[in-house]
């Protein structure tokens, strides 16, 4: 897989353990319908937003307080020409203590500028 992709980071006042728990409560922060477990290694879940976005993710890394990786096994993005742009990409959350705060590094590996939805 191409190791390039979209990335961003931010810091919060919560502990790494609190951040890890919040990330894995996907229903609390990703609007849309979610079917399946989102909080354990090997789990698969499907995300749907109307008829615009449907993806299936498998949790391939799950390191409490430190890292979560979702492998996108199937995508149907109806807002771009290539509706399967996300197939085979990975969504990565890395969590680390940064002084009194916690840094969250988010990367969508494989979501490169050549993809139509990159800017969105």
Image: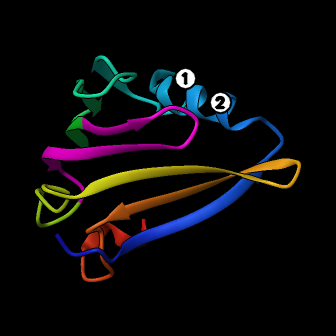
Residues at discs 1 and 2 in contact (Cβ within 8 Å): no
**SS at mark 1 in the image:** helix
Q: Is 118 or 92 nearer to us in this picture?
A: 92
* Residue at 46 percent of width and 31 percent of height: 31
Q: Is residue 3 above or below residue 8?
A: below
Total marks drawn?
2
Q: Is residue 49 above or below residue 104?
A: above
Q: Quadrant of residue 19?
A: top right
First along the sequence among labels 1 and 2 = 2
Q: Quadrant of residue 35?
A: top left
User: In the picture provided, is 75 more to the left or to the right than 107?
Assistant: left
User: In the picture provided, is 16 more to the left or to the right than 23?
Assistant: right
Residue 76: % across, % down: 14, 46
Q: Residues within 10 Å of mark 1 (few under 14, many from 20)?
A: few
Residue named by callout 2: 17
Residue 109: % across, % down: 32, 65
User: In the picture provided, is 117 more to the left or to the right than 27?
Assistant: left
* Residue at 55 percent of width and 23 percent of height: 28
Q: Residues within 10 Å of mark 2 (few under 14, many from 20)?
A: some
**SS at mark 2 in the image:** helix
Which stretch appears magenta? 59-79
């Amino acid at each position: 897989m191409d190791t390039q992709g979209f990335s961003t980071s931010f810091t919060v006042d919560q502990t790494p353990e609190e951040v890890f728990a919040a990330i894995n409560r996907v229903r609390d922060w990703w609007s849309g319908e979610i079917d399946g477990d989102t909080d354990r290694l090997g789990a698969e879940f499907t995300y749907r937003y109307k008829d615009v976005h449907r993806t299936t993710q498998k949790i391939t890394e799950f390191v409490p307080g430190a890292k979560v990786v979702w492998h996108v096994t199937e995508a149907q993005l109806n807002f771009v020409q290539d509706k399967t742009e996300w197939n085979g990409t990975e969504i990565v959350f890395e969590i680390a203590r940064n002084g009194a705060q916690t840094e969250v590094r988010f990367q969508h590996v494989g979501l490169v500028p050549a993809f139509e939805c990159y800017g969105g």
